[in-house]
Amino acid sequence: MEALFFNADSGFLEGIVRGYKAGLLTQSQYSNLTQCETLEDLRTQLASTDYGNFLANEPSPISTSTIADKALKNLVDQFNYIRSNAVAPLDKFLDYITYAYMIDNLVLLITGTLHKRKLTELLKRCHPLGWFEGMPALGVPTNAEELYHTVLVETPLAEYFRDCLKVDDLDALNIEIIRNTLYKAYLEDFQRFCQSLGGPTADVMGRILAFEADRRSINITINSIGTELSKEQRARLFPTIGRLYLGGNNALAKAEDIDQVRSACDSVTEYRAFFEGVGGMEGAAAQIEDRFFVEEVSLNKMAFLQQFQYGVFYAYVKLKEQEIRNITWISECIAQEARNRIQDYITLF
Amino acid sequence: MGTPAVDEYPSLFRSEAMSLVQLFVPAEVAHDTVAELGELGNVEFKDLNPDVNPFQRSFVGEIRRIEEMARRVRFFAAQIERERDPVPIRPLYDSAPLIAVGPGAAQTMDNIDVKLSEHESRLLDMNDSYEVLSARLAELTEARHVLRETAVFFQRAESNQTEIRSSFDDSSAPLLQHDDRENQYLTVSNVQLDLEFIAGVIDRTRLPTFERVLWRVLRGNLYMNHIDITEPFVDAATDNSTYKNVFIIFAHGEALLAKIRKVSESLGATIYPIDANADKRVESLREVNTRVEDLKAALYNTGSTRRAELVKIGESLRSWEDLVRKEKAVYETLNLFNYDVGRKTLIAEGWCPSRDITMIQLALRHATEESGTSVPPILHELRTNKTPPTYQRTNKFTEGFQTIMDSYGIATYQEVNPGLFAVVTFPFLFAVMFGDIGHGAIILAAALWMIFNERKWARADLGEIMGMFFYGRYIILLMGLFSVYTGFIYNDIFSKTLHLFRSGWTFPESGDGIVHGEANGHVYPFGLDPGWHGAENALIFTNSYKMKMSLVLGVTHMTFALCLQVPNHLRFNRLADLYHGFIPQMLFLQSIFGYLVVCIIYKWVVDWSKSSIPPPSLLNMLIAMFLSPGTVEDHLYRGQAFVQTVLLLIAGVCVPWMLCVKPYLLWKETKRIQNHGYVGLVATDDNHIARHDDLEGEEEGDGRAIAADLGEEHEKHDFSEEVIHQIIHTIEFCLGCISHTASYLRLWALSLAHAQLSEVLWKMTLGRVLGAEGLFGKVKLLFVLVLWFNATVGILCVMEVRGCYQIVQPKNVRLLMVGFWDK
């Protein structure tokens, strides 16, 4: 049934986003990019892709950060175009996508203020999709409650922040706890919203968000092993929507080394592969992280296989983000003459 | 394929004879040669390194440099655009041309590059200082506003002060924490408020957030005042104007004040230290005012030097743009070329009209002389059996027509060019619909006006709509001419008639108020008899007349278009297509619709008032011809039943003829070849290239290389594909005949609609007031005349022209393409 009327409201935007997706760089374009000798070559090469002449008006010694900024601007423009054309409930769905960036920005600002960074500098590093009203004022409060009452109460994050109010001062550990609590609440809420939409959206987003939740659980576990974070606290940070919930999460909460993490994840066949050939703690996180990215890309690509659902919008934003990371990686490798690592990008298509 | 003779007279009938040429250009003259050929514009270079990445080609460095220059030029253009008063830009045709060929070329380019970067850095410097100054100015203006507004506030507070004092009289003493300051205040004026406050300026859009955040930070104890600053602040870097507000917040206690400061800073507010002392405020206001004046003067100076710089840039901006664009095109073309082994010569291949080879050779020689070297580029023709590209030489008259035809499809090399016939058929079909002397004359006048202003307007940018009309000015001219002609045939001028000759009808007065026309033996020599105008049955008459006429025209047009394939078949020696394509198609068309046309003309010729039988309905006749062959109800002529049966049989035979014969012949041909023991040549692309190179190597001796790509002409004759193709063709043709004939009736419909519309316009406006008397009547007449004229021009001449144009265009184009149906 939802297929019957989907196009009336969202058909246009789905078409647009599928068009955008067709413009994502392909394997052959990546291999052309990796052959570039200088950033100028890269600029020429990118001009023949869907990015067009987005760098044409930049003065000549071009820096990697300019490339990354412009590419991000490209994504933001596309997202804003879609967002401004969206009607309910797609607009809400798109807003949910931005909440993740809001959380990142929030954490960035608090951490930055903690380390006495300059506010203007911090604001420049914030993700433009996660901008919210009153965001710059985040640097003012000194404890969680104040944070909540001063700024967050009128943002969409307020609901998620309620669980963080117990935290008293903002130190590095507490900020991490805040970040993960927020993320947990966000993921659960987003999942609830997607399930309330029903239909293929619930299916596709259910898969993607469950993976996202598990990824966070595993990351929290790996990163918290050997820190002062207590096991009860750790357990409280795990989102309750993943495929590892409940048994896997319980095992993760008790895990003390990488092998226990591995056995906790054994119940899910797809995750078993992540740990293959992973040695001790050193480098394990980075190795697994890369495999997570690959898995995320393939999940997001799968979202495009189904029609009449909102998953494509989420998937496109994530894929484009990955593409921007890839371009940045390649250009960094070129700029720093680290050509042996240039192949370490993640191919999308 | 017959090799076309080069000395054939150029014509629109077929596309130009083309030759594949190979150029050996010494590297040092390559740039000049390409520039020269670019100016000439009649060589199409082939990409000789299609699998080389764009950034790995030979001239990437040069292109990059040019792009950098282009970026600077764009930057200048944007800067000039941004300047509030328009900066004069000298048009290209007025500027001295920048010459980037010849021995001094590199020097010239270097000079310009240097000049551009100098200009850029100077502009950037000036922009920077301008921005700094304007930022400073904005700050001072803000400060001034804060001072003024707070002053207003304090004044108001002072006037209320007595009441405040009285109410706080008892408990005021503990609140006065800063005794010394209090004393100081008291010395200045004994009515001072003792509250600490923060004043500043904030963006208006952020004000609500700011207020809410503060309210929460201060836990509801917020006393804040804000006032709009009416004039906008313009950011010098982006030209965006923002509106700001002055705010003043009162709070107590250092901690709170610090918090407020922090919030203000984080939300982008600017805080200005304001003294609570009124005299000091006045003093600082004065100081700020003088500094604002100074800054304004400085800003004005910077602005005017910047403007002078821009004016200087504006003088040569267009020629730089031109040069940069040309140079980029030159290097992009050079990138298509191949280096020879020694990297001393560039090898280029391209198509050019055979007729222009001498011109190209002259250009090559010229380029060599210009660049001052003695090694000329060598050009020679290659023999090939690739199909050359189609090149239709046009002039300003045929250009518009050719564009219309090309938008539908482009004929294969050396095929008959339908654009030639479009010159006549297109405006004529238009005129059939638009026939009106008056309206035709208006369009004609408009077209003539555009043509007389041609020289002037060709240079100017006319905008999208006007530019389109101007581009099609010769089409419009012919459309106007033909409309006048058909207008004479319809005898229609603004829905009135012309009474040029003696009418064939007289209208004797009769008693009962109904006037019956009587034939008086005269025949109106040209066009429609004006006697029909206003007659009761005028519409019935013109209806039938125009319907039949459009059918006759339609079938004639289709027959003609069908005939266009004959020269193609003869030229390319495709006799099978002629005998088994063209002839059955023609027979099919003529036996059904040709017959209908003959009947229409026959029915016109017969004087039915003297005939013994009533006039038969031709429509019913055609339907009966299919539904009940062999029987005819209302006879048109004797022996009709037999004739119709024969025609139907002919049409019936033509269908399998078209369908089966050609595939059968093809099949027989392949069989024959296979029986001779030949096997199909399956060549991969790699083979071609290898073969190509081999041959080139071999032939180097006699200086005439042969590029023999055999594969392109050897399409695999896949038999089943051929059959399907043929089935589609046959069905398409048979259905097309019927649907095209029907769609020609649109000529009739549009023509009637046009006539009716112009009649309504006349009756509703001018017809009503034409007889009015007196001054008022005259004024009314004048007013209505203007109204009528505007409506005529607006609705009929512009909107209908567009409408008819859009109908004629696909129809005419498609029908002329009928000739190419067998492709």
Image: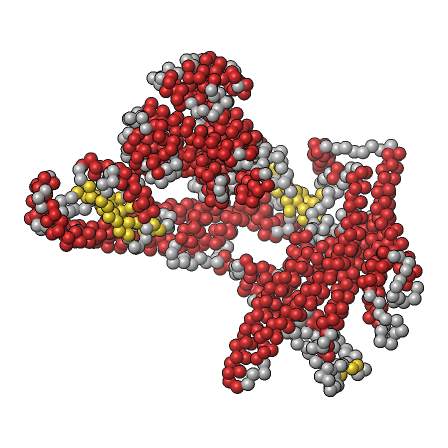
Q: Residue at x 70, y 64 (%)?
A: B749
Residue visible at 49% across and 51% down? B321
Find residue B602 and report its horizontal and vertical position in percent: 85, 68
| Residue A224 visible in the snapshot | yes
The spot of residue B636 in percent (x, y) is 87, 67
Residue B779, position as x, y percentages in the image = 51, 81
Q: Is residue B786 above or below residue B111?
A: below
Indicate left or right for B563 with A145 as reference. Answer: right
Of B26 and B347, which appears nearest the observer? Answer: B347
Give the colour scheme shown.
Answer: secondary structure
Which residue is at the front of the view, B41 or A121?
A: A121
Q: Is residue B431 visible?
A: no
- B661 relative to B318 in the view: left or right: right
User: Going 71% across and 58% down the picture, which residue do you hit?
Assistant: B812
> Could you tell me which residue is drawn at 36 percent across and 55 percent down?
B308
Looking at the image, residue B93 sits to the left or right of residue B177; the answer is right
Q: Position of residue B84 (x, y in %)?
A: 38, 56
Question: Which of the 4 quarters of the picture holds residue A232?
Answer: top left
